[in-house]
Image: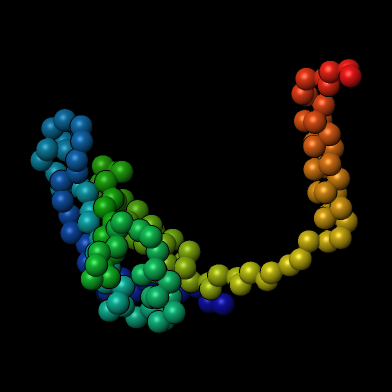
Amino acid sequence: MPRLLVNEAEVELTATRAQGAGGQHVNKVSSAVHLRFDVTGSSLPDEVKVRLLALPDSRLTQDGVLVLKAQQHRSREMNRQDALVRLQALVDSVAAPPKRRRATQPTRASQLRRLEGKRVRSSVKAGRGRPAAPD
């Protein structure tokens, strides 16, 4: 299956100031990047959109917009690349449909092993009580 590439024309990138400590540099340079990707309006296949929107991810808004913030690096270009790589990784994670689980039955031998273990454990616990008083 060919890899699904995210069209960069569908991605909205805005530069903002990074949060946290960093001294003078972080206070005057907009090096952090906010990435917004409208999943519902994208050119991705419908089944991929459905799986992407079904993710339990707090970065997805009610409107189906994915918002990523990249602020690891000092340069805006590196943060931009980081955000795009993270978006692509998220799309790749849902690109292939999940394998369907086939229900199986436990084998006869595994059932017997389980029951034998229960019998052994039961006899161990039965031997822990007070000894019976002689009559």
Of residues 75 and 105, the one nearer the viewer is 105
Q: Is residue 121 left or right of residue 87?
A: right
Q: Is residue 121 above or below residue 58?
A: above
- By what rule are the colours in the image chosen? rainbow
62 relative to 96 in the view: left or right = left
Q: Is 71 left, or right, of 113 in this rendering?
A: left
Q: Nearer the viewer, residue 21 or 119?
A: 119
Residue at position x 77%, y 23% in the image: 129
Give the quadrant of the C terminus.
top right
Residue 88 visible, this orientation: no
**Number of marks present in the image shown:** 0
Measured as percent of width and height from the top left, residue 4 is found at 45, 74
Please state the horizontal and vertical placement of residue 121, each as a whole percent of the image.
80, 36
Residue found farthest to the left: 28
Q: Where is 8 relative to 107, above or below? A: below
Can residue 59 be seen here? yes
Residue 58 position, x and y percent, is: 31, 56
On screen, residue 60 above or below 135: below
Location of the N terminus by quadrant is bottom right
The residue lying at 16 percent from left, 30 percent from top is: 23
Q: Residue at x 78, y 20 (%)?
A: 130
Asked whether 43 or 76 is in front, the reply is 43
